[in-house]
Image: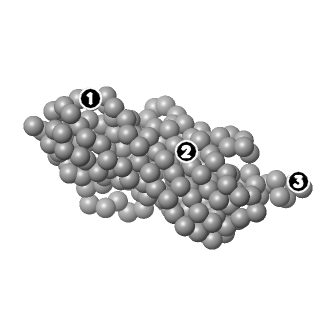
């Protein structure tokens, strides 16, 4: 592999790692919470540290015990891939603490992202609280699979660094 191609591969892996996360959050929808944190991402091409800003929403909020809550996370990155990303999918684990301890997955996927264009991502999932009180959601592990022009499928796994901020707070009533 020549040096130029190797640099492109490393850049593509970085963008893939950012496919489910971003460094600049879009305008938050009404009721959305904003957060900022950092992750360490690993792929076959190495390790990359990234900064993340995003918006998270849990609905309904407040919620009732034993009623499903829908959580969404939206992010936009200012980084772009020098290579086309044909498609991507991501799974983000949300860790819950407070009135109860739990975790649940948020998933999302997207189509083509042209070379040199910003990467955006939306992931969503459901969780059913079983205890009255206040719960906090924090971003957990992230796995991103992207199909990149020339390289095919590349997977990046990302781990949140401490401290992890609260991405959303949910009030649960009886």
Q: Secondary structure at mark 1?
A: loop
Q: Residue at x 46, y 45 (%)?
A: 92
Q: Farthest residue to the right: give it.
A: 2
Instruction: State which tag comes first along the sequence, 3 or 2.
Output: 3
Question: Label 3 to label 1, Cα distance in Å?
Answer: 50 Å
**10 Å neighbourhood of mark 1: few (<14), some, or many (≥20)?**
some
Seen as rendered, the residue at the extreme left is 174
Mark 2 Cα within 10 Å, few/some/many (few <14, many 20+)? Answer: many
Camera-side residue of 162 and 121: 121
Q: Where's the C terminus, which quadrant? A: top left
Q: Which mark is residue 143?
A: 2
Nearer-the-camera pick, 100 or 39: 100
Write the residue at 88% across / 53% down.
1
For the residues labelled 2 and 1, say whether their Cβ atoms are less than 8 Å apart: no
- Reply above or below: 119 against 130: below
**The residue positioned farthest toward the bottom in the image shown:** 114
**Residue occupied by mark 1:** 100
- Between discs 3 and 1, the one toward the N terminus: 3
- Tell me the quarter of the picture where residue 149 sits: bottom right
Instruction: Pick whichever, 98 or 151, lies toward us.
Output: 151
Give the left or right position of residue 54, taking residue 29 as reference: right
What element does badge 3 sit on? loop
């Amino acid at each position: 592999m020549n040096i130029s191609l190797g640099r492109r591969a490393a850049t593509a892996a970085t963008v893939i790692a950012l496919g489910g996360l971003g460094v600049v959050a879009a305008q938050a929808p009404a009721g959305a919470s904003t957060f900022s944190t950092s992750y360490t991402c690993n792929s076959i091409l190495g390790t990359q540290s990234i900064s993340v800003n995003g918006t998270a929403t849990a609905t309904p909020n407040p919620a009732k015990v034993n009623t499903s809550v829908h959580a969404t996370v939206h992010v936009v990155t200012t980084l772009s891939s020098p290579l086309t990303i044909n498609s991507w999918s991501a799974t983000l684990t949300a860790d819950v603490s407070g009135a109860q301890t739990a975790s649940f997955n948020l998933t999302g996927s997207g189509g083509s992202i042209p070379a040199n264009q910003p990467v955006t991502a939306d992931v969503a999932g459901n969780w059913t609280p079983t205890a009255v009180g206040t719960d906090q959601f924090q971003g957990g592990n992230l796995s991103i699979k992207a199909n990149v022009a020339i390289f095919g499928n590349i997977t990046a796994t990302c781990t949140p660094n401490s401290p992890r901020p609260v991405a959303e707070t949910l009030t649960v009533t009886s």
